[in-house]
Amino acid sequence: MRMLAAAAFALACTGAWAQTNVMYRCTDAQGAVTLQNDVPCPKGSKQVKRVIDAPQSAPANAAPPAPSPAAPSVPAVAAPAAAAPATPSTPVKKPEAAPAPPIVDRQPPPAVFRCVTHQKEQYFSDTDLQPSRCLPLQTVGLDGNPGTGTGAACEMVKDRCERIADSGLCEVWQQRLHNAESKLRFGEPAQAATAREESNRAEKVLRESTCSQ
């Protein structure tokens, strides 16, 4: 009897869960158990009241819940291809740089002397040691008459030479080159060899000395 009442109570609770929140369990004097929904037990019965918090059912006209937003699709990224094994390459030989031109230690041009003859003629020389020359003299007779003089006489003289300052050497060598080229063009054929030698020498001095800087 009690097992049947318990089963009926559980069944009533299950049905009441969906319908109400208050259940009454009634036991009369004879021990009979009854379950009542929202109705208190009659007087003289032992009553047990049970309140159940049941969730309310949604109204019939309620709108269905909005679907949750779909997660944005992420484009598939292709996996990077495996790098091909590096193959040893033949090193490219760099062209060798051209050797730098040797540094030339240029020297000042050679010394030059300006010489003056007894007749006031000027010329350039590499030395001031000029040989003596015999300057002819006119002879006269015993009476002092030049027409009756006999024989020959001369006076030994030397040209006066002066060294040119270092600051003017380049200009002088330019002048020597110009004089030699003039002799080659307009001078006597007998002087051509000497003039060509002087021209070549002056060009070399101007090219290899400090005059070219």
Image (tube, grey):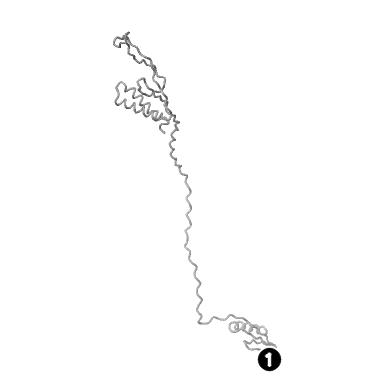
For the C terminus, the image quarter is top left
- Residue 41, given in percent of the width and then of the height, sits at 66, 89
Amino acid type for the residue under numbered disc 1: Lys
Front in this rendered view, residue 69 or 128: 128
- Residue 40, given in percent of the width and then of the height, sits at 65, 89
Helix, strand or loop at disc 1? Answer: loop
Q: Is residue 80 left or right of residue 182?
A: right
Q: Quadrant of residue 110?
A: top left
Is the residue 190 above or below the residue 71 in the image? Answer: above
Please rate how many residues cluster around mark 1, counting C-alpha atoms within 10 Å: few if below 14, some from 14 to 19, many from 20.
few
Q: Residue furthest top?
A: 142
- Residue 211, given in percent of the width and then of the height, sits at 41, 31
Counting every numbered tag in the picture gives 1
Query: What residue is shown with label 1?
Result: 43
Q: Quadrant of residue 130?
A: top left
Front in this rendered view, residue 35 or 162: 162
Front in this rendered view, residue 4 or 19: 19
Is the residue 70 above or below the residue 49 in the image? Answer: above
Q: Is residue 100 left or right of residue 146?
A: right
